[in-house]
C-alpha cells in the first residue's frame, strides 16, 4: 500500500501535475503519525499508511489555496474535500485525490491505557495489532480499539477520487446516530447535568477546532476581541458558549470523521453534539454533508415549505 | 428579588420591515402588553446570527424573542427562509444542551399585526416567567 502511494506521488511530482502533497509521515514516537505537507519528492521516503492516521487531511487544503495539490484521502477526508469544494475553498482541478478505502482508525489512547506501559513498537496485520513495550509484548484485536465514529462509518470508501488504491469497503448500514437519539430522550435537567459534567473537563485548548477541516475562518469568534464574544478562562458558561457555537457552525457541514474527538486531550465526547445536528439536518432537510459537490450545504439554501411549526 | 414579583428580562430582535413596524403599530394603537422586552432593531431576521442569541443567554438575559416577516413577505425576498433553517437548528441544539424549551421564541409578525405582536409578547413573557431566572448565568454555582 505504502509503496503504491509513494510511486504514484513520485510520478505526479515528476510530471509536474502537483506542487505539494498532503501525506502522513512516521512520527517521532511509534504511536503517532505526523500529517505533513511536502513540496518535493525527496520527502516521500517517510510516507506511511497505517491505522494511526486519524487526522483529517482535508484540514490542510484551505491554506494551500492556488497550488496544485496531491492528497491521500480516506472516506471522511474525501467528504471533507467535497465540502471545501462546495464552499469554494478548493477547486476540483486543483487537487489530485488518491483515494484509499479505510477499514477504521485505532483509538491509540485506549490501547495505551490497556497496555499499561510505554509502547515502543506497533505492528498491524489484517485484524490484529501487535504491541511491543520495553518488557512485554501483546496482541490485540483491531476491532476492539476502533474509534466509535469509525465503527459506524457509512462511507469508508472515498466518495470522490482520481485514483483508488485498494478495493472498496462496504459501509455501515445501520443507524449511526444512536448515541444522540438516546441522549435526546433524557429530561432537560438530566441533559444539562450531563453536559456540564462532560464539558467542564474542557481546558479550551481548541484542538477540536484546529483539527476540523470545516473550521477554517481567518479569525475564529473565540479569538476575536472586537467584539469580544467570550471571556478567557475556565468558567463553565464560557466553555458552554464555546461548545454550542462550535457545534452550531457544524450544521450541515460535519462529515462525522471524529477528528475533533480524537484530538481532544481531555476525552470529551464532542461528537455527541455534532451527531445530534447531523441527525436533525438529515431528518429536516434530507441532506447529508459531503456527498454531492453540486448541491449547496443545508444552511445555504432553503425550501418554501421547510418545517415551520416552531414559529409563532 | 423574591420569586413572587420576579419580572424576567426579555430581549427581542425585531426585523426592521415587519415586526418592528408591528410593534410600533401596537404602540400607536395603545394595545397593552408586558413591559419586559428590550427591543433591538435588525435589518432582517436573516441578519440575526444565532451567536447573538447565545451571547444574550450567556450574559444573563432570561428569554429571547426573534421576530421577522412572514414567509414570502421578506423585504429582501428570501432572508427569512434562510433564517428559519438557522433558527430551527439553534433551537434544537439549545434544548439538546439542556437549556429549557421556552427560553428562546420565534415568531412571524407583519407590519399590520399590532394585536398579534402584543399577544406574542404576552405569551413569551408568561412562558419565561414560568421558567424563572436564566440558569445559564447560574452555571458557576451548579
Image (cartoon, coloured by chain):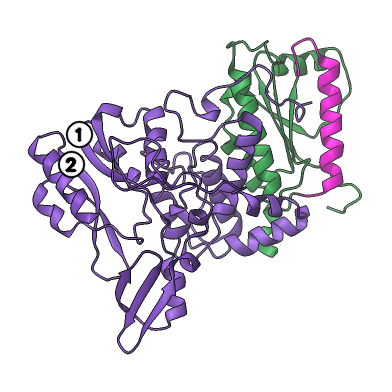
The picture places residue A133, in percent across and down from the top left corner, at: 32, 83
A38 or B33: nearer the eye?
A38
- Quarter residue B109 falls in: top right
The picture places residue A200, in percent across and down from the top left corner, at: 58, 63
Q: Is residue A238 visible?
A: no
Tell me the subunit letter for badge 1.
A
Side of A108 where B6 appears, left or right: right
Q: Colour of chain A?
A: purple
- Residue A50 in the magenta stretch? The answer is no
The label shown at residue A68 is: 1
Q: Residue at x 28, y 57 (%)?
A: A49
The picture places residue A82, in percent across and down from the top left corner, at: 39, 33
Quarter of the image where the C terminus of chain A is located: top right
- The magenta region covers B109-133
| Mark 2 on the same chain as mark 1 | yes
Rate crowding at label 1 as few (under 14), some (14 to 19) or many (20 or more) other CA atoms within 10 Å.
some
Q: Which chain is green?
A: B
CB contact under 8 Å: marks 2 and 1: yes
Q: Is B135 located above or below residue A248 in the figure?
A: below
Residue at mark 2 to residue at mark 1: CA–CA distance: 7 Å
Side of A146 where A44 appears, left or right: left
Amino acid at each position: 500500500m505504502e509503496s503504491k502511494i509513494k510511486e504514484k506521488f513520485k510520478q505526479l511530482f515528476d510530471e509536474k501535475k502537483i506542487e505539494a502533497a498532503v501525506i502522513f509521515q512516521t512520527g517521532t514516537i511509534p504511536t503517532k503519525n505526523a500529517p505533513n505537507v511536502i513540496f518535493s519528492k525527496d520527502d516521500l521516503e517517510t510516507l506511511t499508511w497505517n491505522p494511526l492516521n486519524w487526522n483529517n487531511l482535508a484540514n490542510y487544503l484551505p491554506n494551500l489555496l492556488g497550488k496544485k495539490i496531491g492528497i491521500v484521502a480516506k472516506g471522511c477526508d474525501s467528504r471533507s474535500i467535497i465540502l471545501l469544494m462546495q464552499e469554494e475553498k478548493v477547486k476540483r482541478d486543483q487537487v489530485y485525490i488518491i483515494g484509499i478505502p479505510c477499514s477504521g482508525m485505532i483509538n491509540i489512547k485506549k490501547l495505551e491505557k490497556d497496555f499499561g506501559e510505554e509502547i515502543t513498537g506497533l505492528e498491524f496485520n489484517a485484524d490484529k495489532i501487535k504491541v511491543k513495550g520495553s518488557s512485554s509484548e501483546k496482541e490485540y484485536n483491531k476491532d476492539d480499539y476502533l474509534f466509535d465514529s469509525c465503527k459506524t462509518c457509512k462511507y469508508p470508501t472515498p466518495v470522490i477520487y482520481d485514483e483508488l488504491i485498494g478495493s472498496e469497503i462496504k459501509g455501515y448500514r445501520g443507524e449511526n446516530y444512536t448515541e444522540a437519539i438516546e441522549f435526546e430522550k433524557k429530561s432537560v435537567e438530566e441533559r444539562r447535568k450531563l453536559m456540564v459534567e462532560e464539558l467542564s473537563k474542557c481546558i479550551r485548548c481548541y484542538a477540536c477546532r484546529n483539527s476540523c477541516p470545516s473550521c477554517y475562518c481567518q479569525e475564529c469568534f473565540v479569538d476575536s476581541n472586537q467584539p469580544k464574544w467570550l471571556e478567557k478562562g475556565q468558567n463553565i458558561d464560557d466553555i458552554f458558549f464555546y461548545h454550542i457555537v462550535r457545534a452550531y457552525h457544524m450544521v450541515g457541514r460535519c462529515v462525522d470523521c471524529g477528528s475533533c474527538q480524537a484530538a481532544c486531550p481531555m476525552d470529551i465526547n464532542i461528537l455527541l453534539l455534532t451527531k445530534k445536528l447531523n441527525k436533525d439536518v438529515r431528518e429536516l432537510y434530507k441532506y447529508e454533508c459531503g456527498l454531492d459537490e453540486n448541491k449547496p450545504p443545508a444552511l445555504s439554501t432553503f425550501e418554501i415549505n421547510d418545517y415551520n411549526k416552531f414559529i409563532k | 428579588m423574591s420569586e413572587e414579583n420576579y419580572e424576567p428580562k426579555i430581549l427581542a430582535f425585531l426585523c426592521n420591515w415587519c415586526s418592528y413596524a408591528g410593534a410600533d403599530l401596537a404602540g400607536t394603537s395603545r394595545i397593552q402588553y408586558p413591559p419586559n422586552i428590550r427591543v433591538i432593531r435588525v435589518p432582517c431576521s436573516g441578519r440575526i446570527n444565532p451567536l447573538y442569541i447565545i451571547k444574550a443567554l450567556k450574559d444573563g438575559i432570561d428569554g429571547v424573542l426573534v421576530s421577522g416577516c412572514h414567509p414570502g413577505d421578506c423585504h429582501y425576498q428570501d432572508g427569512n427562509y434562510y433564517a428559519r433553517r438557522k433558527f430551527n437548528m439553534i433551537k434544537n441544539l439549545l434544548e439538546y444542551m439542556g437549556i429549557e424549551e421556552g427560553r428562546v421564541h420565534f415568531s412571524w409578525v407583519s407590519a399590520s399585526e399590532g394585536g398579534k405582536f402584543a399577544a406574542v409578547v404576552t405569551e413569551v413573557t408568561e412562558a419565561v416567567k414560568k421558567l424563572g431566572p436564566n440558569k445559564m448565568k447560574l452555571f458557576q454555582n451548579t
